[in-house]
Image (cartoon, helix red, strand yellow):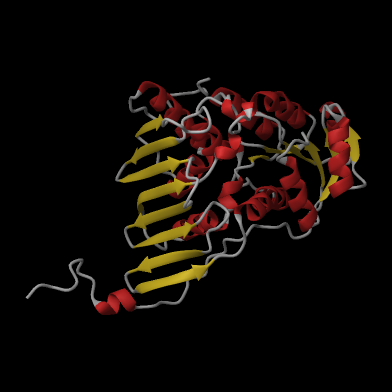
Amino acid sequence: MASDDPYGLSPAKKAAAIQAPTIDYKPPRPQSYQPGIGLIGTGGISESHLHVYEECGWKVVALADRTPSKAAAKRDEFCPEASIYNDYRELLDDPGVTVVDVTPHPADRLPIVRDALMAGKHVLSQKPFVLDLQDGEELVKLAETQNLKLAVNQNGRWAPHFSYLRKAVASGLIGEVTTVDFVLHWDQTWIGGNEAFESIHHLLLFDFAIHWFDITSCLMESRRATRLFAAVSKFEGQSFRPPSLGSVLIEYPGAQARMAFNAHTTLGEEDTTTVVGTKGTLRSRGHGLNDQPAMEIFLEEGHVTVPLEGCWFESGFQGAMGELLCAIEEDRDPSHSARNNLASLELCFAALKSADTGQPVEPGSVRQYAH
């Protein structure tokens, strides 16, 4: 008689419900530390930073931008008592500024981060951190010499589903990770005609997927990748210049991470992440990056679905600054330190080289962003 359960799962195992584990995935906040924050660069993304800082009650005391009117507009909306500077070096001279949030693009950001550390300021750098690993290593050493905290705004680490995954894996809930799978179908057609985005070499793998390389690095913890293969492609009729389709395979000793991207999904967006370990599986699924309502947990003893609170942009920016402030308050390295982030950049740079050459690449062997 043929089995009505070809996968060998008993009805009891399929139906068994378990209690949700205790996983503290929400963004951290300092106990009492309230330094003056200076924001350098008041472009589009700065609004998300300032909105979150205002919501959290963190003090932004100075803004700098080469176009003072832009800084003044942000000041009037979010931090009415903040000082305005058109030269970031004047902001660094402000004794009321203890922590600097640096938002310009990577090439412009490098000297600003260096000057901020030399001025004795703790720094949150926008991502991607640097375009050359040597520059990153030098900034890490400078921060250590100055006894300052240097962190990278990899805000995706505190997206509720990614934060839950990180904390659950670190707790040993599902044992040792064997596979990580990211399958993303989203609509990025809004960049069509925007030269700032369309001119980025490997927009998909560099500007966007840096978050997924970073999360992969977190989930694999101390394991180093041995080989990476990446490919991108365009299709006839897509509405922007950079390739909209991409895939990445990262090999680790006894494990793999796989990514599949379609940035031109105008109908039926979906974002699914599955992490399989030797003792269980974690899965998050939603209609987009900011819509990941629950975490599914499958263990030997049964399964449970845990509702998630928060969304990427709110929780992500809270976590990036909050973790830095906690690290300063507790005098420890921030979990998103610049040193920690260099491993994520190794994956990203290897992916760009692989996509350009059509060959597998050893992460760490490519030291620069390929323009």
Residue 322 location (% of width, % of height): 69, 52
Q: Is residue 159 shown above or below 63?
A: below
The number of discs equals 0
Does residue 363 appear in the picture of this structure? no
Residue 281 location (% of width, % of height): 37, 61
Identity of the residue furthest to the left in this view: 1
Residue at the image point whose x is 36% and y is 27% from the top:
361
Residue 175 location (% of width, % of height): 37, 59
From the viewer's perspective, tell me whether residue 223 is left or right of residue 323: left
Residue 111 location (% of width, % of height): 71, 23
Residue at the image point whose x is 71% and y is 35% from the top:
103
- Tell which of 172 and 142 is nearer to you: 172
From the viewer's perspective, tell me whether residue 356 is left or right of residue 300: right
Residue at the image point whose x is 37% and y is 29% from the top:
362
From the viewer's perspective, tell me whether residue 258 is left or right of residue 54: left
Q: Is residue 314 shown above or below 1?
A: above
Does residue 224 appear in the picture of this structure? yes
Q: Is residue 37 shown above or below 368?
A: below
- Tell which of 201 and 65 is nearer to you: 201
Q: Quadrant of residue 12?
A: bottom left
